[in-house]
């Protein structure tokens, strides 16, 4: 009699994610981490102090399921300023355990098993896993990498006919990540207008992962909320978080913003996933959002400087790389180095140079599209990025 595996079939493809695998290998070789997207420095002291103050002010018991009122009010006010849309903190904002939990809450809340959900590839891994765990079918639409060599500034783009063909009678939702991980792409108004047109035509809900919304490097490419486009306010769930904007990824404070009917769907799932989020950190997050301008501009300048340094180094070593206008990451084409695939290249630079990166095939349904590509993170201290650069130069210039 065959023994049934312990792990459920729906989770078997995700038993060990790429970040755990690479981090384990990197630790073995004491590698500089340019892999996972979290800073190796803390966010601002005034936010940490606000968390300590909240603890000693006795904000230590369960928070309301929807979130601490002060934080929901700060989120609603921020979204209103950004979008120009009205936002009721009581009926439209839900605080979640990072965007990582907001995503499955949105998908579980609105989708039935058998529904289809469109997503763009490359994708952040939890996008696809959330769809599959909901019993739905992910339908990938490729962001094609632009042609060119050396420094490539053109964006990854989807083909309108491929996007249109992805919509069927089974499509329940489309998941959009802008600014985009891992490419750094910022979706344009024209691209979002096409997405909106197709959502309205097919009666589809849009789930927008906007966690990098403040980490923009090109004034010509602003972040645009899909909910602001005609007909989309009542069919868009906007997700974001504190972690990327304030370099506090370990706090896991995120949120979902949606029309009241969609918010009820998100909360229906949220209440059984985590119910409520760390109370003192929510109070501190409210302080952070109300004083955002005191920190974010300096973070953007740091990230831009790190990006430029890493890009220049990759160029000097003969790599083709895709210069990102936002976010934490830069993608490079490793094929000029003669490795069989992205995993072989990453294992080589970890073991031989002590530099960790992420193989991009992990972000694709069509994995062959990612095999030539590797993702480096520059959301680190300047000295960390410099150490990674020095090690890569020592390896490849030898």
Image (cartoon, helix red, strand yellow):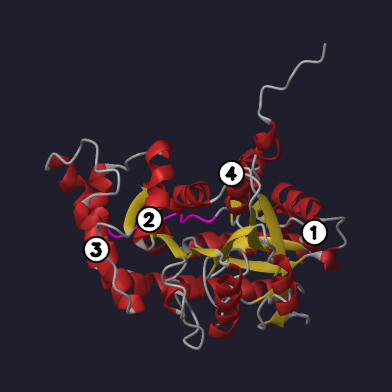
| Residue at (58, 85) in percent of width and height | 190
- Image spot of residue 259 (x, y percent): 37, 63
- What range is drawn magenta here? 37-44
Q: Is residue 90 above or below residue 62?
A: below
Depth check: 301 or 367 in front? 367
The circle on residue 263 is 2
SS at badge 1: loop
Mark 3 or mark 2: which is in front? Answer: 2
What residue is disc 1 on?
Answer: 371
Q: Quadrant of residue 160 in the image?
A: bottom right
Depth check: 107 or 70 in front? 107
Quote the CA–CA distance across marks 3 and 1.
Answer: 42 Å
| Residue at (29, 43) in percent of width and height | 65
The circle on residue 134 is 4
Does the magenta stretch mainly form a helix, a strand or a loop?
loop
> Considering only order in the chain, which callout, 3 or 4, is on the residue closer to the N terminus?
3
What residue is disc 3 on?
Answer: 74
Q: Residues within 10 Å of mark 4 (few under 14, many from 20)?
A: many
SS at badge 3: helix
Quote the CA–CA distance across marks 3 and 2.
Answer: 17 Å
Q: Is disc 4 in contact with disc 1, using a CB cutoff of under 8 Å?
A: no
> Considering only order in the chain, which callout, 2 or 3, is on the residue closer to the N terminus?
3
Depth check: 146 or 333 in front? 146
Q: Is disc 3 in contact with disc 2, using a CB cutoff of under 8 Å?
A: no
Q: Residues within 10 Å of mark 1 (few under 14, many from 20)?
A: many
Q: Residues within 10 Å of mark 2 (few under 14, many from 20)?
A: many
Quote the CA–CA distance across marks 1 and 2.
Answer: 38 Å
Quote the CA–CA distance across marks 4 and 3.
Answer: 31 Å
């Amino acid at each position: 009699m065959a023994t049934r595996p312990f792990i459920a079939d729906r989770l078997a493809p995700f038993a060990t994610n790429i970040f755990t695998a690479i981090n384990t290998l990197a630790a073995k070789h004491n590698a500089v981490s340019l892999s996972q997207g979290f800073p190796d420095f803390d966010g601002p002291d005034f936010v940490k102090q606000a968390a300590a103050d909240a603890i000693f002010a006795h904000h230590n018991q369960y928070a309301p399921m929807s979130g601490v009122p002060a934080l929901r009010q700060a989120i609603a006010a921020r979204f209103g300023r950004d979008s120009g849309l009205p936002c009721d903190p009581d009926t439209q904002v839900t605080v979640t355990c990072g965007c990582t939990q907001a995503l499955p809450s949105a998908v579980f809340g609105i989708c039935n098993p058998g529904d289809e959900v469109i997503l763009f590839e490359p994708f952040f891994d939890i996008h696809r896993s959330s769809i599959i765990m909901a019993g739905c079918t992910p339908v990938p639409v490729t962001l094609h990498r632009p042609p060119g060599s050396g420094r490539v500034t053109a964006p990854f783009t989807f083909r309108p006919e491929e996007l249109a063909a992805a919509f069927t009678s089974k499509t329940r939702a489309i998941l959009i990540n802008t600014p985009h991980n891992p490419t750094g792409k910022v979706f344009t108004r024209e691209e979002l207008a096409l997405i909106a047109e197709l959502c309205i035509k097919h009666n589809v809900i849009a789930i927008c992962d906007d966690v990098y919304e403040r980490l923009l490097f090109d004034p010509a490419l602003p972040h645009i909320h899909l909910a602001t486009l005609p007909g989309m306010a009542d069919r868009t769930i906007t997700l974001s978080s504190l972690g990327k904007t304030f370099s506090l990824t370990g706090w896991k404070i995120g949120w979902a913003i949606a029309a009241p009917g969609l918010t009820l769907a998100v909360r229906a799932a949220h209440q059984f996933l985590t119910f409520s989020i760390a109370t003192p950190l929510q109070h501190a997050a409210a302080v952070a959002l109300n004083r955002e301008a005191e920190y974010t501009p300096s973070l953007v300048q740091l990230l831009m400087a790190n990006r430029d340094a890493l890009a220049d180094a990759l160029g000097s070593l003969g790599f083709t790389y895709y210069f990102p206008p936002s976010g934490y990451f830069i993608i490079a084409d490793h094929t000029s180095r003669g490795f069989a695939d992205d995993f072989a290249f990453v294992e080589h630079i970890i073991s031989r140079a002590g530099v960790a990166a992420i193989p991009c095939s992990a972000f694709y349904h069509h994995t062959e599209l990612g095999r030539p590509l590797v993702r480096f993170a520059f959301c680190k201290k300047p000295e960390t990025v410099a150490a990674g650069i020095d090690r890569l130069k020592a390896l490849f210039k030898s």
